[in-house]
Amino acid sequence: MTGPLRDRLAVVRCGGRQGSGYLLTPYVVLTAAHLVLGQDPVRVTTPGSPADVPCGREGIWYTPERGVDVALVACAVPLAPAVAFGGDSWADITAPAPIPRCEAIGFPYVQRGTGGQLDTEQVTGTYKPSGLFSGRDVLMVDGTPPAARPDDVSPWAGLSGAAVFAGRALVGVVTGDPVGRQHGRVTVCPMHRMLDEHAFAVTLHDLGHTPARLVAPPGQLTDEAADFEFRYQTYAGKADHQPWCRRDRPLVPGRAAPAPRGGSGRQRTDPRHQGT
């Protein structure tokens, strides 16, 4: 199976804001930082939880001028069954080539039903690692973009925090709708850059999540034969078992991953991002 998994999707709410998220463990949710800024309580809903569950901020990394907009929140009770987890791969993006057939699933305004009821929208498109100076990459959306809202709020409002995947590899987190693009693309904070943020890597480790491996997604492999093989194996659901697509490197050298646990509500904000 490829792309985001249903049991790991999440709705994130905080202080009147609503966005999306993705479970890295049964207790830990990856989302966009701008959704959970401030002191208002954070609550998360998943397909497996009967109601909103309170979560604590475990870390916030928010520097818009560098394209950094990621947060980790955690709760004390499992939000999804443990069988939905394991063997995660994160994309290692090393070239500016576009990555086709990416997808994200979130809870945007455009997909709301009668009475404002939330529902999922599966967004597919091509990932462009083009944010050389801004740090913000983009997902160019397939098909016709959603119509603009009369109140000038983005029709993609609520999609922020959704995880973007290329096959089974986590690529990034949706962070916004860029001005002047007629809602035909969304900005993405790439996760491979976050792994270079020491505090982020340490927090992931302390929360019990270490990506199984870093992989080069389609368009990022220099060997054309290997690129074709990756795409075929992704189609067949076997890409994460191929040794030639691995790019292993430790997240926190010399430290073994602890057993998963619930969040304690502690907030770890990198000193470089204080005041966000």
Image (cartoon, rainbow, N blue to C red):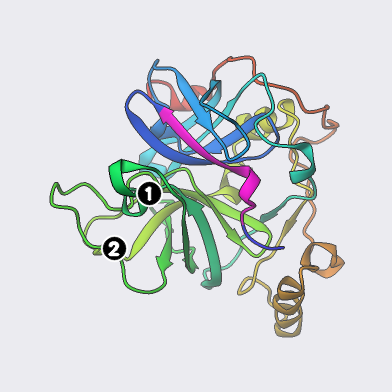
Circles 2, 1 touching at the beta carbon (< 8 Å) = yes
Neighbor class of circle 2 (other Cα within 10 Å; few <14, some 14-19, many 20+) is: some
In the image, residue 165 lies at what x, y percent?
Answer: 59, 58
Q: Earlier in the sequence, mark 2 or mark 1?
A: 1
Q: Position of residue 32 (x, y in %)?
A: 46, 38
Residue 174 position within the rendered picture, expressed as x and y whole percent measured from the top left? 45, 49
Q: Which mark is residue 166?
A: none
What separation in Å lies between label 2 and label 1 (alpha carbons)?
11 Å
Q: Residue at x 51, y 26 (%)?
A: 52
Is 186 rendered above or below residue 158? below
Q: 226 left or right of 48?
A: right
**Residue type at the position of mark 2:** Pro
Q: Quadrant of the N terminus?
A: bottom right
Residue 255 lies left or right of residue 201; in this view the side is right
Q: In the image shown, does 80 or 236 lie closer to the viewer?
A: 80
**Disc 1 residue type (three-letter):** Pro
* Residue under numbered circle 2: 146
Please, what secondary structure does the residue beneath circle 1 have? loop
At 53% from the left and 62% from the top, the residue drawn is 103
Q: Which residues are magenta?
A: 4-13
From the image, tell me which residue sits under label 1: 108
